[in-house]
Amino acid sequence: MSILLFLFLLLFIPILFTLFHIKKMNNMKYNLPPGPTKLPIIGNLHQLQGLLHRCLHDFSKKHGPVLFLRQGFVQMVVLSSSEAAEEALKTHDLECCNRPMTNALLKYIREEETDLMIKKLKESAQKKSPKSPVDLTKTLFHLSASIVFRVAFGQSFLENKHINKEEIEELMYEAQRINSYKFSDLFPIVGVGWFIDFVSGQHKRFHNVFSKVDTFLNLIVNDHHQPKSQTQDPPDIRV
């Protein structure tokens, strides 16, 4: 009898919390943008099929450049036009974004790395034929990595000869891909999302990738702590 009662409570309590959370969300009155019809609990997850950017583009053609979506218990507003993005991120930046202020002391690093990127793009374009494409994805990744490296370690990402840049680039993309979509973010209550991530193997993939990231960062820190008087080159940093 006690086992049956325990199993009943184990199933009933998460359902009760879920229903309470849904009722609380429905009672909140906001002036929200239009959006597609949502289902209980899952919201619009069932409508996000195929490539995400194409789904959002189709929604914007039907509901307008500013639309409201709900993924699980996470509510979000999607901006699909340059005018809406400018109004939210520039005109009403403080109200919409709450982003931290940029440290003015680090401004010269961004400017210097940006100038180097433009210079390399110009040199690359001059070497290629007029119709040859330029890989902006890799270029912008190197720009971001160089800025972060110089701020964190006082080193340039491109000029550091002890970093396997191809492996680091692949690792960062994999970490971003895994961390960008987790059920624990969409269903944060009573461990529902965590359980789905665990069963699907997302936790294991997440742990493996970020273990490699930790190894890479530890090697960078150890190299940074080495005395400047050492003349021998440290081993290549690989993950």
Image (spheres, rainbow, N blue to C red):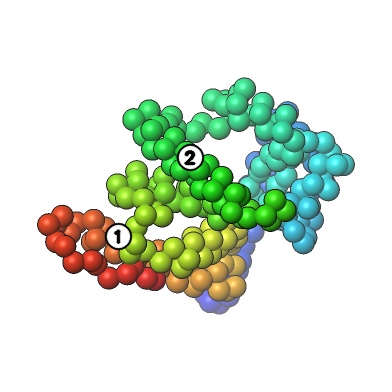
Q: Which residue is mark 2?
A: 114
Q: Which residue is mark 1?
A: 220
- Quarter occupied by residue 233: bottom left
Residue 238 placement (x, y as % from top left): 37, 70
Instruction: Examine the rendering and report whether any part of residue 187 can be seen.
Output: no
Q: Residue furthest right?
A: 62
Answer with mark 2 or mark 1, whichever residue precedes in sequence: 2
Residue at coordinates 55% horizontally, 32% vertically from top-left? 97
From the image, which quarter does the C terminus lie in?
A: bottom left
Q: Residue furthest top?
A: 91
Q: Are marks 2 and 1 in contact (CB under 8 Å)?
A: no
Q: Is residue 4 above or below residue 16?
A: below
* Mark 2: amino acid: Thr
Instruction: Examine the rendering and report whether any part of residue 84 can be seen.
Output: yes
**How far apart are the alpha carbons under marks 2 and 1?**
23 Å
Q: Is residue 2 above or below residue 41?
A: below
